[in-house]
Amino acid sequence: MLEKLLFRRKQAELFKDDVFPEKKLVKSLLEKTYELVPSKQNLMPYEVLVLGPDRTDEKEELFDLSKNTQSTESSFINSYHNKQLLAPYVLVFTQRLAFPPNLYVQNLIKKGRKYEECDVHDYKNYKNIPAIEIGMFMLTLSCLCLKNNIDVSYTACLPHKKERFSFINEDMYIVMSLGYKKWNRQKKNENKPTIDEVISWV
């Protein structure tokens, strides 16, 4: 069952805007994901900002900022891509100060244990674990969406600093889009490396 779901997942490049999942269903899938997803010490040092079908201005802002994320030396403009950012539901994953922490972690902090993700002065430098946990959240949510015939896509082609956005208060990691696809991304010669290049038995 799980294999069939994951084999079915394709990067949706454009979503239908006249028909989309009910808010009640999407909310229930997010709540189920929250219940299922693992987190180191259950701190969940990230936030999920949900832009629903009515938040068109914010989605347009994301889309506009995705058009050129290259360095100033590059002439490449990504203007025809990333229309998945205009999907009915767009989830923006950002960093989060994990404070106050749960009682277990509070007791460890009192004993001298350091938790950067709970420290207002250090949490900005704590990037790796939130990134991993966001990936697990996205995969869990993707499986639940696919089980309910909802299509998904992911977008990383965005500036990650909060200063670039009017509605985001923390540095951003990645965006996930949900809805019913019009078509999937299909690019020639965009193949994975061989399995031997990726998986090595030591």
Image: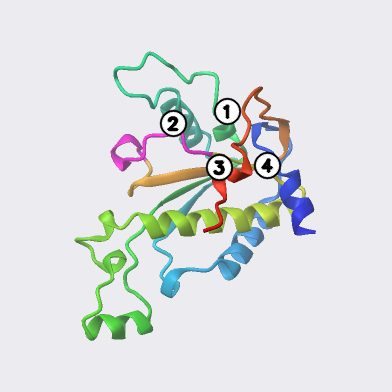
Q: Tell me which amino acid carries mark 3.
A: Glu
User: Cα distance, mark 3 to mark 2?
Assistant: 38 Å
Q: Which residue is mark 4?
A: 179
Q: Secondary structure at mark 1?
A: helix
Q: Earlier in the sequence, mark 1 or mark 4?
A: 1
Q: Position of residue 158 (x, y in %)?
A: 42, 34
Q: As rendered, which of 76 and 68 lies closer to the eye? A: 76
From the image, state whether disc 1 or disc 2 is nearer to you: 1
| Residue 195 place in picture, x, y as percent | 62, 44
Q: Are marks 3 and 1 in contact (CB under 8 Å)?
A: no
Left or right, residue 32 beside residue 4: left
Residue identified by numbered label 3: 197
Give the residue number, with chain letter if any, for mark 2: 61
Residue 109, percent from left and from top: 26, 80
User: Which callout, 3 or 2, points at the residue further toward the start of the chain?
Assistant: 2
- Other residues around mark 1 within 10 Å, as few (<14) / some (14–19) / many (≥20): many
Secondary structure type for disc 2 = helix
